[in-house]
Amino acid sequence: SQVKLQFESRSNVNCFVFTAIVYKTQVVAGTMYFIKVQVSEADYVHLKVYQSLPYENQGPSLESFQTGKTRDDPLTYF
């Protein structure tokens, strides 16, 4: 996926697993997604992904991320 490639490039990590577990949304001028993603058997990351409004015709953009998360870490806005 586009977001996976952006994350791997910016974090310098190759993810063999990239499975979204849970997400939250925040409506802005578009939508901000906060997504917990499993990237290995025990490792998780939290992604902040921006999806612009449909008429802007742009794909999702990785805004920021937090590494070193576990499955039990609460997903919060950041």
Image (cartoon, rainbow, N blue to C red):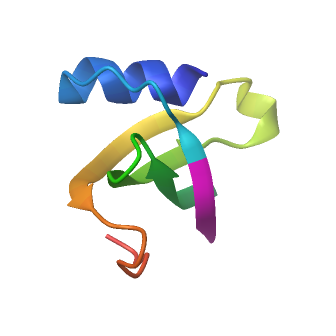
Specify the quadrant of the image occupied by residue 54: top right
Percent x, y of residue 44? 36, 54
Looking at the rendered structure, the number of numbered marks drawn on it comes to 0
**Quadrant assignment for the N terminus:** top right
Q: In this view, does 48 lie above or below 58?
A: below
x, y percent for residue 19: 59, 43
Q: Which residue lies furthest to the right in this view?
A: 55
- Magenta stretch: give its range: 20-28
Q: In this view, does 31 lie above or below 24?
A: above
Question: Magenta residues: mostly which secondary structure?
Answer: strand
Q: Does the magenta stretch include residue 26?
A: yes
Q: Closer to the camera, 54 or 48? A: 48
Q: Nearer the viewer, residue 44 or 64?
A: 44
Instruction: Pick whichever, 18 or 47, lies toward us.
Output: 18
* Quadrant the C terminus occupies: bottom left
- Percent x, y of residue 69: 27, 63
The quadrant in which residue 51 appears is top right
Q: Which residue is drawn at 40% across and 82% down?
A: 74
Across and down, in percent, residue 39 comes to 41, 40
Residue 57 higher or lower than 48, as above or below: above
Residue 29 in view of the camera: no
Residue shown at the point (19%, 21%) measured from the top left: 12
Residue at image x 72%, y 43%?
Answer: 53
In this view of the protein, can residue 44 be seen by the observer?
yes
**Is 32 inside the magenta-drawn segment?**
no
